[in-house]
Amino acid sequence: MTPKTYPPIQPIPAKPSIYGIDPALVGMRAAELPGIVSLKLSELFPDLPPTIYPNADDSVDPIRLAAEEALMKVDMGKIKPSDSVNVLASHHGFTLFGGRPYAELLKAIRDVVERQTGCTNIRLRAGVGMRFRETEEYMRQYGLDKHYGGKVAGIAPIDKGVAIETEIGTLYGLDKAYDADWIIHSHHSDVREVHFHRQVDKAVKPFGMSYARCETRSTYHQNLGPRAANFIARAIFESKFVQSKFAFAAFLDCGPHGILGVDADADLYALNDRATFIGCQLYGKIMTLFGEIDECVAVLDFPCPVPYVFSAGVIYANFLGANSDLYDLDTPLPGYTWYTEAFYGKANRPILPETPPINPGIKMCVHNYAWIGYPSAFFARHIPTVVVGEKQGELFDTDSMNIEYMDHAVTARSLPQAMDFARQVTGTDKVIVFDGAMGGLNVSESMSRLLIERAPVVSARVGTELLPKWLRQRGVDMSILERLK
Amino acid sequence: MKKVTLLSRVDTETCRGCSICQKVCPVLAIAVVDKKARVDASACRGCSNCESRCPYFAVTMVKRADPFVVSADPGAYDRNKIRELCEKAHMNPEQILCYCTGVRAEEVAAAIFGGAKTPEEISLATGIRTGCTIECVQPILRLVKAAGFELTPVKNGWQWYGATITAWEVPKTVAEKYSSRGFYFDDDRELLDRIATTPPQGE
């Protein structure tokens, strides 16, 4: 069946946050622009598995059911009624498919653990990246503070630390993440920052990031190199300290098109292998398809910082590097990752000439709605950027991470004016919108034609050529491919 | 180099003197005196850590009436010495260390030659680690160590606890044990060495 185009999918609504402008100031969403259509991912890639969310009723009940079913299979025998438990969460989960599915998983974990073990001292500790109050906001927005009886805390990488002895020396975790008898690692298989983790040990990564101190995060991003860095999380997870507290992991299984189910396991590496497969196979296709885009205007329109806005499950930061194969570990530096950014010299070009540029297919970026809280000046310096509305520019001027962002961007009064400007300057009518549209993506008609034409070729290439290579590079049991045939 | 446009302001009515702001300030610009937090406006580099971690929301960031720039000039010191120090820390002088402010290794080296001996003094001089305040702490520690200074964390502070492993210190046993799982220890070390030894673009 040839994929069709549909009316635009409703974007994720603007959210009230100290990191974004007042939602009332977001005048128009890109999905409302004339000529924007949507594509369904399940039609672009018909072999994508069925999802339980989004659904026709916009209900998270299927998430609750899947979570309870998966959690009931986990042996929780080591948690005693008098013990304390920290449910560890990360901010990224709340950005997936509107945030409610992840919140529902976190609620289900609390309920099932209490029911199965009799333990009542169950706390939620939600880690962040650079926006230190972000999970405090989410926990209030999704009622998690009430559900956990007030036993919730946002934890940030500059909070009090705890030294963790590992195979590679001392690393540092967050004291509040580990101040319980047991920890439950509550995460998801959404790939998000493939440019950083390269889908190596993705399921383990929060131990080196959202549950970790700044020293550890800096080790990851500065000390080991772009592909060795992922070992930091494994080193911490395998430490005696963490192993003595680890109870089990519970993950939302995500595809680019929706939530597939819930996976829970006391063996994190078994879960990691399954997440690696999903990350490479399901997300690998749409990532590779995005690499086929020869020219476009990218519109940012999602309640997240610039690199984290989503289109079809792919974040903008990954689109910036889509001109190379992010999953191929033989490529050390993609067009964008922090190691790549670090290795730009004073002449504003890479120190190593073979480093790929930022995706040259992105001719212009229209920043309609995106948050502060991530150093983004590099993007504006290398991609012509139009920011919609003066208030948004003013907000960036107050962010210590983005003091220079607006030095490299221009401002338009409205989204239609920004789009007119972009079309006239770039000469392309291909538009891709990063607005978190669930189940598909919003694009211009010309872009839809390109994606429809290239999807079957990409799908075949990923299945027969790229996926076996990606899994081999990661040491994933190749028989998983045989079993799926 | 950093353009310092923001300043921390404490509402002393709301402040309870818990001193968390003091523990997280990367330039030691805020301190609790007589149970109230006080900001040294000339030292504040506008990172917002105090505002973001205050449990009582007693701190706000305000626009400075007179923004200023902090920087250390690598051109003021012997180029070879700067390069030597950076290479000792396995860095290219032009390598960016701070993604928020764009401070490069050579500028940190210049701050050290200018008299900075601790990460806090380096942040004060260059503005490095006054954006997100998270990601660039290790390269600063590497340069301070390469310059021969002892790494002593701030007493009772949470600014940083210690230096950690680098690509040049990964035990062979670890590299061999895990290389089949997608960890490219040796290849990445070679990549970092190539970066460190490539002539700077400014030369």
Image (cartoon, rainbow, N blue to C red):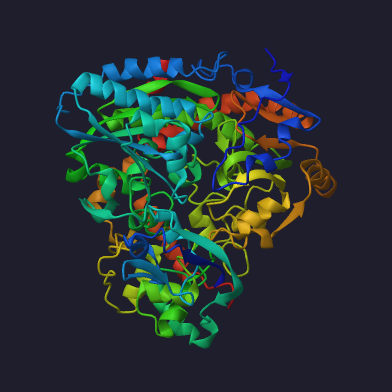
Q: The C terminus of chain A lies in which quarter of the figure?
A: top left
Residue A197 in which image quadrant: top left
Q: Is residue A18 above or below residue A56?
A: below
Residue B77 visible? The answer is yes
- Above or below for B51 versus A322: below
Visible residue check, residue A225: no
Left or right relative to B142: residue B62: right
Residue A255's x, y, as percent? 50, 26
Q: Nearer the viewer, residue A305 or A153?
A: A153
Q: Is residue B135 left or right of residue B147?
A: right
Q: Position of residue B128 (x, y in %)?
A: 47, 68
Q: Residue at x 53, y 77 (%)?
A: B71
Query: How many numbered dots are placed on residues in this image?
Result: 0
Name the residue at 46% across, 51% down: A130
Q: Residue furthest front?
A: B13
Above or below — where is A261 with respect to A292? above
Nearest the eye: A292 or A177? A177
Q: Quadrant of the N terminus of chain A?
A: top right
